Image (cartoon, helix red, strand yellow):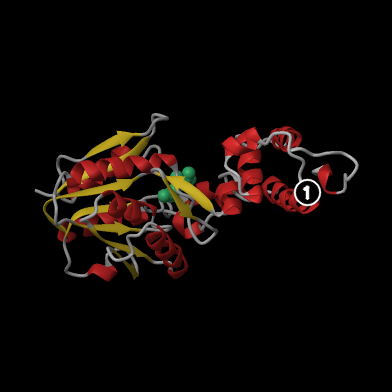
Amino acid sequence: LPPFAGAVEETWTIGRVIAWTSEFFKRKGLDSPRLTAELLLGSVLSLDRVHLYTDFDRPLQKDELAAFRALVQRRASGEPTHYLLGRREFYGRSFRVDPRVLVPRPETEMLIEAALECLGDHSQARALDLCTGSGCVGVTLAAERPSLRVVATDASLPALEVARENASAHGVADRVELRAGDLFAPVARERFELITANPPYVETSAIEGLSPEVRREPREALDGGPDGLTLIRRLITGAREHLSPGGCLLFEIGDRQGPAVLDLLGTAGFPGASVQKDFAGFDRIARAHRD
Ligand code: GLN
């Protein structure tokens, strides 16, 4: 365990603490050990990473060491870094995150790129963001397109509280309407120019094999049923009647779900659908258009 809490004789500078903790995280087999040490220490000291380096020789106070030590222990026992920080960057903005919501992933930023492309310079568009979670997709779209109106839905009330906080923090609460309910249930008979979703798509049997960090995330944000496609199937079936003519449907999918998802889209009347791979070469974003 981190030795520095009781070690009053030794001077634990920012530099030494980072070096020790990086080594500790590395021995524990955690991803990005040094970055994690820096992010956690930065949050305790309210310093960004650049300032940790300019203040490298600054000794830490006893209470700072104690607070940091507690975070290091929690991280080592499997709590996700971004829950400990309470924040995660997404598409250049900082989002509040905690165990009520899935931590936004970098590959989900591809959904934003595709959505902005689909919106073009449409000035009166309305977008529907399903399974909004932290709100990272819906809030980002509203922030990127100042005339866009977004309806964001989630079955989880606790998740919607986080989304509400994020919509306010990014100044788009007046254009992001949050509604509770299962998929399209809160938008009966409404149509949108764009539908986005990052639905749960992990096969139930694969959940156990996920990293301890991912298993701390809300199960209902991950578990896509026996073949991972339970929500996606319902999303595809319901999408058409909620899209305006010419509207786009864009959603995230699992690593190898591309062929099955294209089949489902074809059957549901989206013949020209396509799947985009992520930077690791995995199936990731499904795109379809209503004619
Ligand atoms: N991308 C998540 C993972 O890494 C899954 C998210 C989801 O099911 N939408 O497991």
Rendered position, 150 above or below 65: below
Q: Residues within 10 Å of mark 1 (few under 14, many from 20)?
A: few
Query: Which sits in the foreground, 233 or 185?
Result: 185
Left or right? Give the position of 73 relative to 286.
Answer: right
Left or right: 31 with respect to 247? right
Q: Where is residue 230? Give x, y as percent.
A: 36, 55
**Whether residue 200 is situated above or below residue 120 in the rendered picture:** below
Residue in the image at 64% along x and 38% along y = 52
Q: Is residue 188 visible?
A: yes
Instruction: Please indicate, yes or no, whether residue 202 appears anywhere in the rendered image.
Output: no
Where residue 182 sits, quadrant-wise, is bottom left
Find disc 1 in the rendering and name its residue: 61
Which quadrant of the figure contains the N terminus? top right
> Residue 117 in the image: x percent, y percent?
21, 41
Q: Position of residue 14 (x, y in %)?
A: 72, 38
Query: Residue 263 versus residue 174: which sits nearer the camera?
Result: 174
Front position in the image: 44 or 134: 44
Amino acid type at circle 1 is Gln
